[in-house]
Each structure stands twice: as C-alpha cells, then as structure tokens.
Image: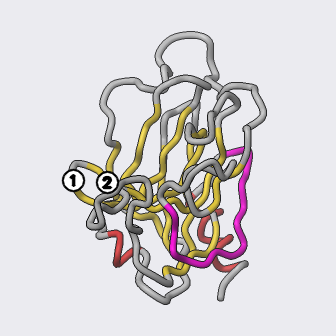
C-alpha cells in the first residue's frame, strides 16, 4: 500500500520497440518479487495493466514461486482511480490461504473481479492452511517492471510516498485505518 500521484503520460512510449506510436500495456506501481524471480515475476503487485483490452488498476499475486498468478481488477476506469496530479492511497491484499484478493482506494474497497478462473494458486486439497513459498522475495518493484535496471519496462510517470509491504493480509478496517493514519 502507499500513496500514488500520476504526474505525466501513462502508459509511457515503449522504448523497447522501434515503433514511435507503441506504448507499454501496463504502468508499474509497486510490488514484491517472487523468491525465484528473474526481475519480472511477482508475489504481490499493484499495477495498471491491460485486462481484456482495457487498462485497469489491479492486484496481481502469485502464491508459489514458479506458479501461476491471479489478478483482481478494479471495475472503475483506471484514470478515475488514479487521476492526474492527485494523491491517492492504494492498497491491495492477498490471502494465499482462501484466495481472497482486494483493492482499496483511499481506505474504501474498490469493486472488481478475478481475471483467472479455476484454481491458479492451487488452493484445493491438503495441506491446510495454504501458504506462499517460504523463499525470501528477490526484491521490490517500484515504478516499473525490471528493478535490476537491465531494461525499462512499464515505467510509472508518477510520484510515490509511504509505501508499505506487509507479510500478511489486511482487513477492510485496516485498509481504512492506514489511509486515515497516513492521510494527506
């Protein structure tokens, strides 16, 4: 969770292609890499990404290193979730035991939907409770997709403040309290 303020054009022109009209299909906000990540695979991520042809604010999570991800996408247009030149508090939570994911804007839940059907986190069956891989995350992603600076990917033309990464899920009440506690 943290504060985000869009300050420029998003998504950015794609510097990895020769086409001048090509833009990235995402805007990286902040997240934690998996324990086996090559710099892109994440355990928990806040991002603006294309979902079925539409850019949306999402929470993207991966329970197991090397495993499949699940995405919770906000219904609301991403530009109204993150309006230009306005500080917005965003939070995401990932319950790797129940499969519950949620997004919050300024302490309030953002209605949305899961983008992957079935059981991508492999929660069905024993053992219980289901936990994330016990590996230490390989790093933090802030404002883009390749934190090791080997290439640009999905940069965010924005400012950020007060980022928090927790090792547990948060409740609706906690999201509201964090917003109020760190209020602008």
Q: Quadrant of residue 50?
A: bottom left
The residue under the point 70% across, 51% down is: 140
Q: Name the residue under label 1.
A: 53
Q: In which quarter of the image is residue 18?
A: bottom left
Quadrant location of the C terminus? bottom right
Residue 87 circle label: none
The residue under the point 69% across, 48% down is: 148
In this picture, is 132 found above or below 23? above
Where residue 178 appears, as percent x and y from the top left, is 68, 70
Report helix, strand or loop for mark 2.
strand
Q: Residue furthest left?
A: 53
In this picture, is 34 found above or below 85? above
Where residue 149 appears, as percent x and y from the top left, is 66, 52
Describe residue 54's horizontal placement relative to residue 95 as left or right: left
Q: Are marks 2 and 1 in contact (CB under 8 Å)?
A: yes
| Residue 163 part of the magenta-drawn span | yes
Q: Give the range drawn in magenta.
A: 155-168
Where residue 106 appears, as percent x and y from the top left, is 53, 76
Which residue is nearer to you in this view: 144 or 115?
A: 144
Q: How many marks?
A: 2
CA–CA distance between discs 2 and 1?
A: 6 Å
Where residue 132 appears, as percent x and y from the top left, is 65, 29
Which residue is nearer to you in this view: 181 or 76?
A: 76
| Residue 78 part of the magenta-drawn span | no
The residue under the point 33% across, 35% down is: 116
Which residue is nearer to you in this view: 36 or 125?
A: 36
Q: Mark 2 points at which residue?
A: 50
């Amino acid at each position: 969770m943290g504060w985000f303020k869009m300050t420029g054009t998003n998504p950015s022109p794609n510097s990895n292609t020769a086409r001048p009209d090509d833009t990235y299909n995402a805007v990286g906000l902040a997240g934690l890499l998996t324990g086996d990540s090559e710099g892109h695979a994440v355990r928990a991520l806040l991002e603006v990404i294309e979902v079925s042809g539409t850019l949306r604010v999402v929470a993207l999570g991966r329970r197991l290193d090397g495993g499949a991800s699940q995405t919770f996408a906000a219904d609301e247009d991403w530009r109204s979730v993150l309006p230009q030149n306005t500080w917005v508090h965003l939070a995401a939570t990932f319950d790797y035991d129940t499969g519950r994911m949620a997004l919050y804007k300024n302490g309030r839940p953002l209605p949305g939907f899961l983008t992957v059907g079935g059981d991508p986190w492999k929660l069905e069956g024993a053992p219980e409770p289901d936990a994330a891989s016990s590996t230490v995350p390989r790093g933090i992603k802030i404002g883009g997709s390749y934190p090791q600076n080997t290439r640009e990917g999905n940069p965010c033309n924005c400012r950020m403040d007060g980022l928090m990464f927790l090792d547990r899920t948060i409740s609706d009440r906690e999201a509201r309290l964090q917003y109020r506690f760190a209020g602008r």
